[in-house]
Amino acid sequence: MQHVDIGIVGGGIVGLTLAAALKDSSLSVGVIDKHPLSTASGDKATSRVSAINQANITALQNLNVWPHVQPNRANPYVAMHVWDKDSFGDIHFHCHEMGSDTLGVIVENQALVNALAHTVEKQNNVQVFETSIERVLSGPNQNMVMFDNSDVLSCRLLIGADGANSFVRQQAGFPITFKDYEHTAIVANIKTEMSHESVARQAFTPTGPLALLPMSEPNICSIVWSQSPDKANELMAMDDTAFCHALAAVSNSILGTVELETKRSAFPLTMRYAREWAKDGIALVGDAAHTIHPLAGQGANLGMQDALELAELLQTLSSEGSDIGLHKNLRPYERSRKTEAMKMIAAMDGFKLLFDGNDPIKKLIRGIGLAATDKVSVIKQAFVSHAMGL
Ligand SMILES: Cc1cc2nc3c(=O)[nH]c(=O)nc-3n(C[C@H](O)[C@H](O)[C@H](O)COP(=O)(O)OP(=O)(O)OC[C@H]3O[C@@H](n4cnc5c(N)ncnc54)[C@H](O)[C@@H]3O)c2cc1C
């Protein structure tokens, strides 16, 4: 049996951000994932990407992770164009309005995980265990984590960074609130006739939003097209040509004709919110604690902020000689991050409600809201500042 102070189950973006942020602490850390952390990148861009905001990029730069992100797998975007297909609402943001060179970066998830893994695997205080966990036995001062290869790891604090269907959350008995968004996101990479010019675009349609995220090649975009499950099934069943015609039509052919670069994948979207995030010896971060609609690209961003805030608290507790496993010591993290997640969930619900459907009053509100945000510089700056995570 081995022992670490902190066991992190999940070596995704969030779990690895937490391990990286603990680099200067005296705490020993075990990262457990059922898959190898890094995967060699192929020739072509992959379609699972995240728009990482400026606040998190700065944090990754400070942790010396960002320089290890393969440059052709991340693209800074300089502007955003959001429009409502069904009203006169249309809004443009440019990074120069914020005195910044970028609004954020579209990065392939695996490229970010690879960069984080590169950093974490070099940390003296981290051990990586490539195995699945089968069981957690929680005692008053230790958790015993049983691996599927029969090994056992003991740790004072066990952190669930194991994604939406978190096993740690289930073992801890934390209840969740969940809601089916009644949307399925279709994800793929497309090749566009015109260059995207590093502008992130999002069209709101009565049946759901379509995001066109600019990748590092000027004619490749990653799409996230959220639709009702029936409509998504219909789109998934189309042949490539019919799908591309439907996509060009819904995006007003803003980038000309399009071709598929990768196959399409579909993700049913569910809001999940753990009603408890911590107890003695256990805490949750990232998708294990919350999942939200991707329409504003905030899930990974929220999760990374959970990780950074928890790491800071754990380092403070450890340097004071306080117990990192006591629930009362973890409460400041739980309180503060639950509030942020709740605010984001409420905002996504508001957006979805406002932009769903053809109701004429909603259309008017959307048109006026987007037009006003575009014209009133104070509102616009507040909006962009929020999107940048500042
Ligand atoms: C279509 C779509 C688009 C999105 N776009 C954006 C965006 O633009 N911006 C943004 O910020 N967010 C976005 N998100 C959300 C974002 O992808 C997630 O919030 C983020 O990836 C969650 O990271 P995580 O590390 O918490 O979990 P995960 O990425 O799910 O990682 C969990 C890890 O735990 C491991 N694991 C699970 N169970 C076990 C076990 N029992 N034992 C050992 N290991 C285990 C898994 O192998 C995995 O590596 C999007 C989501 C979707 C669906």
Image (tube, rainbow, N blue to C red):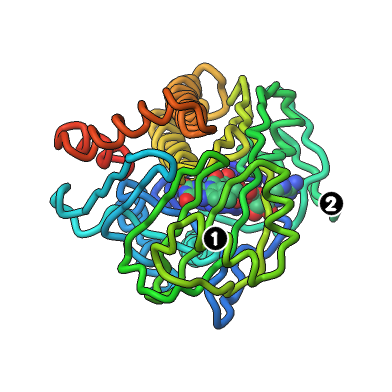
What amino acid is at disc 1?
Answer: Leu
Q: Residue at x 31, y 52 (%)?
A: 80
Q: Secondary structure at mark 2?
A: loop
Q: Residue at x 43, y 45 (%)?
A: 85
Say whether mark 2 is within 8 Å of ligand 1.
no
Q: Is residue 365 above or below residue 301?
A: above
Does 39 sit left or right of 18 as displayed?
right
Image mark for residue 148: 2
Is tag 1's residue or tag 2's residue first in the polypeptide sequence? 2
Q: Residue at x 24, y 49 (%)?
A: 93
- From the viewer's side, name the closer residue of 25 and 89: 89
Dot 2, how many residues are within 10 Å of its Cα: few (below 14), some (14-19), or many (20+)?
Answer: few
Does 16 sit left or right of 240 as displayed?
left
Q: Is residue 110 above or below residue 178?
A: below
* Rendering coords of residue 140 (x, y %): 69, 22
Q: Secondary structure at mark 1?
A: helix
**What number of labels is visible?**
2
* Rendering coords of residue 334 (x, y %): 50, 24
Does 227 sit left or right of 109 as displayed?
right
Residue under label 1, please give it.
Answer: 247
Quarter of the image for residue 182 reads top right
Depth-wise, is mark 1 or mark 2 nearer the camera? 1
Residue 32 appears in the figure: no
Residue at the extreme top: 328
Quarter of the image for residue 127 reads bottom right
- From the viewer's side, name the closer residue of 155 and 106: 106
